Image (cartoon, helix red, strand yellow):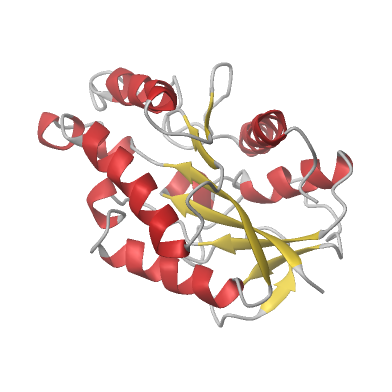
Amino acid sequence: MKLDLFLLIGQSNMAGREALDGIREPDPRIVSLNAKREWAPAIEPIHFDKPGIAGVGPGLEFARTLMERGASNAIGLIPCAVGGTKIEHWVRGGDLYEHAMERADFAMQSGQLKGILWHQGENDAMDADDAVPYRKRFEAMIRDMRERLGHPRVPFLAGKLGYFLSPDTFPFAPLLRSIVEETRQTAHEYGWIDSAGLEHSGDSLHFLSASARELGRRYAETYLSMTGHSAG
């Protein structure tokens, strides 16, 4: 069975942190690459960056939405997000860049890479030293990942930071939201996802489970709009 593959990268709001409520029966057409590099039925939590606190993220709902919209091939998710990480870990040469590329290489033995989903930036929105160089780092990361994976035009989707982030703690969140949107002017096959109206789980940092799933649906709608067809 050849899979349509999607790489999930970023920090805790991609991995998911909110309670595991509303868990649905796994769809046999959606699998996830686990920590042992084994394909298994995708069920929350699909990430394993911080066992015990990993929760509902947008990735699985993204895949479910593609299926509901008529995807013809099975979907393989490649979860690689790690909470509390800055973009410096994700650029070429960074530890998480290398880890994600290695997992993607392994996964591509089972199918074709169809998209990269990114949600990150909270840890870069607290200080100017991280926020100011974010644009160049982000653009370089997209280019380098595509080149490294041998898919120069694979769709890359990035979500905006939650609007509930405190301006006192995350003063540069508006700048990073702007960068995510404006990158469409410099990167081809790129889409951004708005987080307007989504709610936090009570900590003013992580998306509520329902909002994380809504974010996943928004990623899917953006992907379908970009590609003009279902995942298959």
Would residue 34 be seen by someone viewing this image from the given angle? no
Q: Position of residue 142 (x, y in %)?
A: 38, 46
Q: Is residue 99 visible?
A: yes
Closer-to-camera residue (168/232): 232
Give the residue at x 76% y 48%. 231
Residue 105 position within the rendered picture, expressed as x and y whole percent measured from the top left: 51, 73
Identify the image quadrant of residue 139. Answer: top left
Q: Residue at x 75, y 32 (%)?
A: 228
User: Which quadrant: the N terminus?
Assistant: bottom right
Residue 40: x and y, percent? 72, 74
Q: How many marks?
A: 0
> Between residues 197 and 63, which one lies in front from this camera angle?
63
* Residue at the image point whose x is 39% and y is 53% from the top: 83
Q: Position of residue 113 (x, y in %)?
A: 61, 59
Q: Relative to 86, is 223 on the left or the right?
A: right
* Towards the viewer: 116 or 168: 116
Tell me if 151 is positioned left or right of 10 in this view.
right
Q: Is residue 172 above or below residue 87?
A: above
Between 5 and 123, the residue placed more toward the observer is 5
Residue, x 84% and y 62% (percent of image)?
29
